[in-house]
Image (spheres, rainbow, N blue to C red):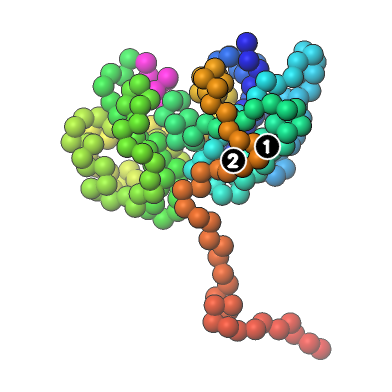
Amino acid sequence: MSLILNIETSTSVCSVALSEGEEVIFERTSFEGPSHAALLGVYVEEALDFMRSKEREPDAVAVSAGPGSYTGLRIGVSMAKGLCFGYGIPLLAVPTLELLASTVIRSQPDAGDRLYCAMLDARRMEVYAAIYDEALRSVRDVSADVVDADTYAAFLERGAVCFFGNGAAKCKSVITSSNAIFIDDIHPLAANMAPLAARAFEEGRFEDVAYFEPFYLKEFHATIAKNKVLGEVVRPDVG
């Protein structure tokens, strides 16, 4: 059975897990983030030590591929690539919103006919969101949505829609349909990647380690200080 090292750094949560098939045999998670630069290497080394104690090596590395935090995704993907190159093993990419939806759907096996809207915070009233059915089939592809009362109206008119992820809380005040169901405290976690990573491994859906990039959805824009925009030069005090 495949032994997969799972890495998740798309939000402020940092997590690593080892899975055999769909069973998680080791995991480390911190909600005290963002702390990926400090913790990810520590968690990965602990996972490798655990494997060495069992005289095992990973068969693949799975990484949460975005969308999400620009910095977090780059740290996670860089670590995953380094491990793949070092061990000579394949890279698996797990879409972050699919991971969130899978987590909720598996926690509600008897929920019936609902739609599942996974949301990641993209600042202000914008979210990265995708909608899935109860079989984790895509109903609406990932997009950057500016959320107002009408954004998901067409889906809510058809029936119940579950909203979750760290972008959902700020939408409660504007999505007021009686068909809207908000589920709190759903995070993308490495341990929950196991079923999706195992399926990708079995189906041979491997990424090109050299050229794979996270799915940012929108390009990163660094904030420019106002004085630079205005062409001012700030000089240190002398004397």
Q: Quick check: marks 2 and 1 in contact, CB under 8 Å?
A: yes
Cα gap from disc 2 to disc 1, whole angstroms? 9 Å
Element assignment for label 2? loop
Kindly identify the residue that appears in the image at 38 percent across and 25 percent down. 136
Residue 201 in the image: x percent, y percent? 56, 21
Using the image as rendered, state which of residue 90 and residue 235 is in the foreground: 90
> Mark number for residue 212?
2
Kindly identify the residue that appears in the image at 33 percent across and 23 percent down. 134
Kindly identify the residue that appears in the image at 56 percent across and 49 percent down. 70
Q: Is residue 2 left or right of residue 181?
A: right
> Mark number for residue 124?
none
Element assignment for label 1? helix
Q: Is residue 24 left or right of residue 139?
A: right
Quadrant for the N terminus, please: top right
Residue 230 in the image: x percent, y percent? 54, 82
Residue 160 drawn above or below residue 149: above
Q: Is residue 90 left or right of residue 168?
A: right
Residue identifier under label 1: 81
Mark 1: amino acid: Lys
Bounds of the magenta span? 104-109
